[in-house]
Image (cartoon, rainbow, N blue to C red):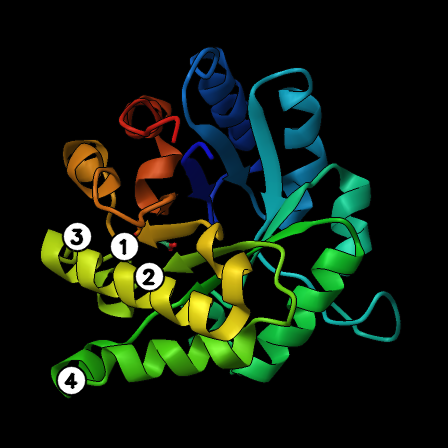
Amino acid sequence: MPQLIAGNWKMHCLAEQAVALAQGIAAGAHGLAAELLVCPTALHVAAVARALHGSAVAVGGQDCHQSRQGAHTGDIAAPMLRDAGAGWVILGHSERRQNHGETDELVREKTLAAVEAGLIPIVCVGETGDQRAGGQETEVVGWQIAGSLPKPFAGVIAYEPVWAIGTGKTATEEDVATMHAFIREELQRQFGNAGQTVRILYGGSVKAANAASLLAIPNVGGALVGGASLDPTEFLTIARAAQAG
Ligand code: PEP
């Protein structure tokens, strides 16, 4: 399976900038070994999907509600994302877990809603700096996998150590290798054979300069990229470092 390079644009870009960014990425995306995905704010999913139509770049959302529809002011349902042109959705990002109090159980419900709507979920897990300092990283991530993923699970996992997100601090290659091997084992333990093929992305200050070494680590199935995904040249350089699998 090819590596997946996913850009999380977070709460960046006005509509015109989002379309220009998407076009810049699409212009350099042909013939790459990697699968490419960009996740703009929900408001721009439709415009970005139109701009990317016929290109090698897919579109995703950054969150969805756990219900298909209803009285949920300000929320966005998975079928709405799908209807707007999204094929993917990021769920349980640490910024959602921290800023919006999302629990593993809620992430699991959202994941079910996403799959039901025909979206491929990218479920994020990862320990905080304090948890790592306390030696709890595997325990925390094991619980997050057990609690956040429905069975069966048809999606992708992103291992994102919270202390490495947007900080410029990247986990060492050894840390990434250890955590990805642990997640693979946990997936096999919890999901049997199906756990062998789930892609496990690494996220946390991935940039052009460190992409090749991170993407070469066993069990790394791609990257979830925040800050560096806002620059087409940087994002495409990361994508070029990816492997066909
Ligand atoms: C992210 O938010 O998913 C992320 C990995 O951000 P950054 O690449 O900026 O650390």
- First in sequence: mark 1 vs mark 2: 2
Residue on which disc 4 sits: 135
Which label sits on residue 160? 2
Residue on which disc 3 sits: 168
Q: Are the residues flagged by discs 1 and 3 in contact, CB closer than 8 Å? A: no
Spatial separation of the CA atoms under disc 4 and disc 1: 19 Å
Q: Are the residues flagged by discs 1 and 2 in contact, CB closer than 8 Å? A: yes
Task: Give the residue type that dot 1 points to.
Answer: Gly
What is the crowding at mark 3: few (fewer than 14 residues within 10 Å), some, or many (at least 20)?
few
Q: Residue at x 65, y 66 (%)?
A: 152
What is the crowding at mark 2: few (fewer than 14 residues within 10 Å), some, or many (at least 20)?
many
Q: Secondary structure at mark 2?
A: loop
- 193 on left or right of 113: left
CB at mark 3 closer than 8 A to ligand 1?
yes
Is residue 76 visible from the viewing direction of this image? no
Residue on which disc 1 sits: 204
Task: Give the residue type that dot 4 points to.
Answer: Gly
Of residue 48 and residue 78, the one placed in the foreground of this image is 78
Vertical side of 135 occupied by 88: above or below: above
The C terminus appears in which quarter of the rendering?
Answer: top left
Q: Residue at x 32, y 52 (%)?
A: 202
Task: Give the residue type that dot 3 points to.
Answer: Gly
Indicate the quadrant where residue 68 lies: bottom right
Q: Secondary structure at mark 4?
A: loop
- Where does residue 24 sit, x and y in percent of width and height? 46, 18
- First in sequence: mark 4 vs mark 2: 4
Q: Nearer the viewer, mark 3 or mark 2?
A: 2
- First in sequence: mark 4 vs mark 3: 4
Q: Nearer the viewer, mark 4 or mark 3?
A: 4
